[in-house]
Image (tube, helix red, strand yellow):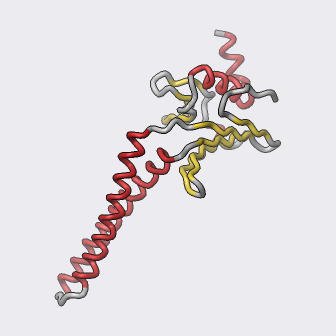
Amino acid sequence: MNYPDIAGVTFEETPERLKVVLPVRRQWPYLLVYSVLMLTWLGATVWMLTLLFGVSRGDMSVRFLIVWVIILLIWAYLWYRLGSFVWRWWQYFAATREILLVSQATLIVRRPLSLLGVTDAYAMEHVSPFYYSEKNGAVAFDYGSRGGLFGLGLERPAAQELIAALNRRFFPHALDEDDEE
């Protein structure tokens, strides 16, 4: 299949899937905020661990120790959840490219950051044809009751070319419906 020549976008097709590599436009304010949050989370974790070991060496009654352990377990769980949330969004905004892996069965949107990164996978049977989201200025699709976005670094004409190529390859019936309207 012939794919459009879009600046910064590469297409690799194998019999199993299509790989599309897209540039990502850095959103510096968000990256800065999440970097500060990540550093704060790490600093507070080290501080709490040193405090924990300092308090645990003191003489405590058994009742106080049980309550202390329960409070620490609840805190550790909530702190872990907060850290994983901040870590995920920091990786999202730190990534410099976006990779789509599209097959007949799955759509994978990956924002790699070296060996790390954020990956979302969708079953193609529930993915709607791709369209341009005016609100977000990106390529969008619906997945059940929630939506998905990618291609935030593309200008509108380039995004529309990408949408046409992806829909031609994976949603040919959607093109027929558009022609009828």
Residue 164 at least partly seen: yes
From this view, report whether residue 12 is shown above or below residue 166.
below
Quadrant of res 114: bottom right
Q: Quadrant of the N terminus?
A: top right
| In this rendering, position of residue 29 left or right of residue 159 | left
Q: Residue 41 at what x, y percent from top left?
A: 34, 60
> In the depicted view, which residue is nearer to us: 25 or 61?
25
x 60%, y 41%: residue? 98
Query: Which image quadrant for residue 23?
Result: top right
Q: Which corner quadrant of the image does residue 54 belong to?
A: bottom left
In the image, what residue occupies the spot 69% across and 12% down?
A: 179
Q: How many marks?
A: 0
Residue in view at x 49 percent, y 47 percent: 94
- Quadrant where the C terminus is found in the figure: top right
Location of residue 18 in the rendering, given as x and y in whole percent from the top left corner: 74, 39
Q: Is residue 144 visible from the viewing direction of this image? A: no
Extreme residue toward the top, this view? 181
Q: Position of residue 7 (x, y in %)?
A: 66, 29
Who's the residue at 67% across and 34% down the image? 9
155 vs 88, nearest the viewer:
155
13 left or right of 49?
Answer: right
Residue 96 lies, in percent from the top left, at: 56, 43
